[in-house]
Image (cartoon, rainbow, N blue to C red):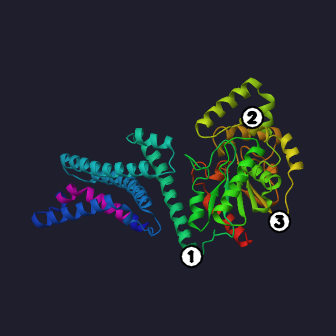
Amino acid sequence: MIKKILTTVLLVMVCNFILWQNILQLKNGRFWLVLVLSLLFYLAFSVLPERFSVRDLKYMTLRMKVLYGGCELLTAFGYGFMIELVFYVILLIVGNLPWRLLLANALVFLVLFLLLEMQGIFRLLLLSKQIKVGKKLMVMFFWWIPIFNIYIIRKVTRIARIECEVESHIAQMDAARAENQVCQTKYPILMVHGVFFRDWQYFNYWGRIPKELIKNGANVYYGKQESALAVKESAKELSAQIEQILEETGAPKLNIIAHSKGGLDSRYAISMYGMHEKVASLTTINTPHYGCKWADILLGKLPLSVVKKVAKTYNKMFKKLGDAHPDFIGAVEDLTEERALVFNQEVMDMPGVLYQSVMSKMNSPKSAGFPLSLTYRIINMLQKVENDGLVPITSAKWGEYLGDVVVSGRRGISHGDMIDLFRENIAGFEVRNFYVDLIKDLKSKGY
């Protein structure tokens, strides 16, 4: 903090060079020496502000260093501007300097400090992945409004600084566990996506998670089943993918990590298509093993014509994205509580396969945007049970239950947060480390 204060004070002094030159009556050699040193300091701070920080930059990527530098620029701008205001108030009260000198000095200071602010803003807008589009637009259009700009810039600077902290912490942990390859399990990892998404084209369903697992030694593959099919059809595609992976790797079995409906697809493949001999473990994430009440409502309360129209639109769109025969209604029907009851009677757990599950919960409707905020309320109203916006906690427990994923405050962890859908850093929950720990545990169990 002392270093930051001293740096900011020195920066303010440098930007008040006209005033100091007049007060100290610098001439000839001394004038040019001080001017050159002042310019060098200003340029050094402007280009490499992170170097003036007390923070260890060792584990930051170039993007993070530049972003962190943007935070330093904006912090210096904010505090420096306040110091300058106090300084000018004192000058006006006790000083007798010419107003032309004070005005010229103020204009030079303002230009130099606004250049720092603009550079800091550009760094945050271009490099931060955690600042939402809405906040970026607010900064772009309202950065010039006094008072409000301090509020919004302070807010986005905090977000960007936390982003740098989280990413450098992850990098530091990766460096510490690099030699151990903590995610190098005995069997390959198959990650199976849920309904209404695809996991291998255009957009990675699992966010930043696979890259982190691979970095720590995991051998990762994807389910590649279509986005929306009845469970038995998805399970058929999944079984073919399992066969292909084992043939490609030469491994006798694999471990499945499945999210949402992907857990039901996996259970069906294991029990009904003979994959029990080729799957060592199944870990389900927020899977509705006992169904979802909202699915019953969607199919039971809405007019059939509306359901069919939604299904037709969905199927048409995902055909264009590559699905051969998407089936919206078939997928949703298999998520109802009625179907879940029949499913659990027919699809029995197989000996020799480790079944385990985990579940998260939202703490309020504000934990997620629409439609999860709405379905969270519906589940609360109908069942009065904690949920992730789609699945009640009571529906997700299967096999060995590994516990609830929770955080304090109103944020909570939604259905989408568990797969890093929005690539968002959530206070109290680092999703990449969560999956690293999950795979580490499989490795320790001999899988």
From the viewer's side, name the closer residue of 83 and 308: 308
For label 2, the SS is helix
Q: How many C-alpha atoms fall within 10 Å of the one at disc 2: few (<14), some, or many (≥20)?
A: some
Image quadrant of residue 400? bottom right
In the rendered image, the quadrant that contains the N terminus is bottom left
Q: Earlier along the polypeptide chain: callout 3 or callout 1?
A: 1
Circle 3: residue type = Gly
Residue labelled with disc 1: 179
Would residue 41 be found to the left or right of residue 210 on screen? left
- The numbered dot on residue 352 is 3
* Residue 389 in magenta stretch: no
Secondary structure beneath label 1:
loop
Rendered image quadrant of residue 227: top right
For image coordinates 69% across by 44% down, the residue present is 195
* Disc nearer the start of the sequence (3/2): 2
Q: Which residue is mark 2?
A: 329
Residue at point 87% right, 54% down? 348
Q: Does the CB distance between marks 3 and 2 fall below 8 Å? A: no
Q: Kindly identify the amino acid type of the residue bearing the numbered disc 1.
A: Glu
| Residue 436 seen in the current view | no
Q: Percent x, y for residue 125?
A: 43, 48
